[in-house]
Amino acid sequence: MSLDWPMPDDDQAGDEYVKYADVYDVLYGSREVDEAFYLGCARSELGPGGELLEIGCGTGRLSQRFLREGYELTCIDASAHMLAQARRALAKYEGRVRIVHEDARTLNLGRRFRLAMAPFAVVAHLLTNEDRYRAYRNVYEHLEPGGLFVFDDMPNWMAEPADGRSLEMHSSGRCPTTGHPVRLLCNSVDVADQPYSLRYDIIDWLDGERIVKRTVIRAVFRNIAMDEELAILRDAGFGAIELLGGFDGRPLDRTRPSSNERLIVLARRSS
């Protein structure tokens, strides 16, 4: 299979979140599977307080959890529309949160952190090795000596191949303004001989069995091989790298990829 549309360029990358912004919290606001893990990282690295860098904060789902626990945050995201939602959600924490419209590939905050995180497969939007290197190097430069960078992903080599034949229920919620149920259906396909997955996200607003509104979003993700990922992280300067296979802290099993629930990378700046 070949791509029948142009790949996103720097101006288009993240455009799918223009359509997602208003409904993102309806679909993902209650997601909790990663919260305890990332909060545990903060407690381990920062103790009961301190400031961390969140890359790809979106509408502020995880940000709110950290702020409620007493941490301070610098939050960045490449989508202005998602950040508009985050500013509303985090307004009551003014003084403890800094929200910056920025791309990880061009990040330049002029300061360093003990902990940086990029949750919920943010790195999958980095579609070339150069994109990944630039982002990882920028994160490295924003870490204190000994600082930790943590991110998670779900590359296609950890699951059954996606052939585009199925339409799966991914998440659901209820629109707070209309009361209509909202569902997210996903159709995914891995591109033959290319390190990409294509996904169509179909968002339906329902009135009983009737669809009253439908939005279709196309997203492209990069499925990088593990050895390639590690090489880029090392080229960016990271030394000690730990790989986990789930938010429960299990080691990554590279011999049986499908036995892992999630790829989690913990990369530390040594100097």
Image (cartoon, rainbow, N blue to C red):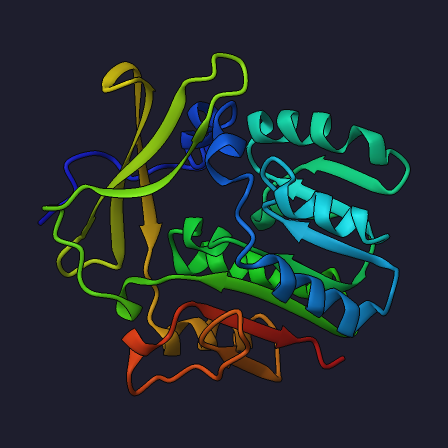
Residue at the location (53% across, 69% down)? 247
Residue at the location (35% across, 65% down)? 224
Which sits in the foreground, 183 or 38?
183
Q: Is residue 73 visible?
A: no
Which sits in the foreground, 142 or 157?
157
Residue at the location (38% across, 26% down)? 182
Relative to 16, is 42 above or below?
A: below
Q: Residue furthest front?
A: 208
User: Where residue 60 appears, x then y in whole percent?
Assistant: 65, 39
Residue at the location (59% across, 27% down)? 80
User: Where residue 92 appears, x then y in whole percent?
Assistant: 83, 31
Relative to 83, is 258 above or below?
A: below
User: Where residue 74 appears, x then y in whole percent?
Assistant: 77, 46
> Is residue 22 shown left or right of residue 16?
right
* Mark count: 0
Image quarter in which the C terminus is found: bottom right
Question: Image quarter for residue 240?
Answer: bottom right
Q: Is residue 85 visible?
A: yes
User: Where residue 212 appears, x then y in whole percent?
Assistant: 30, 12
Which sits in the foreground, 52 or 182?
182
Relative to 208, is 24 above or below?
A: below
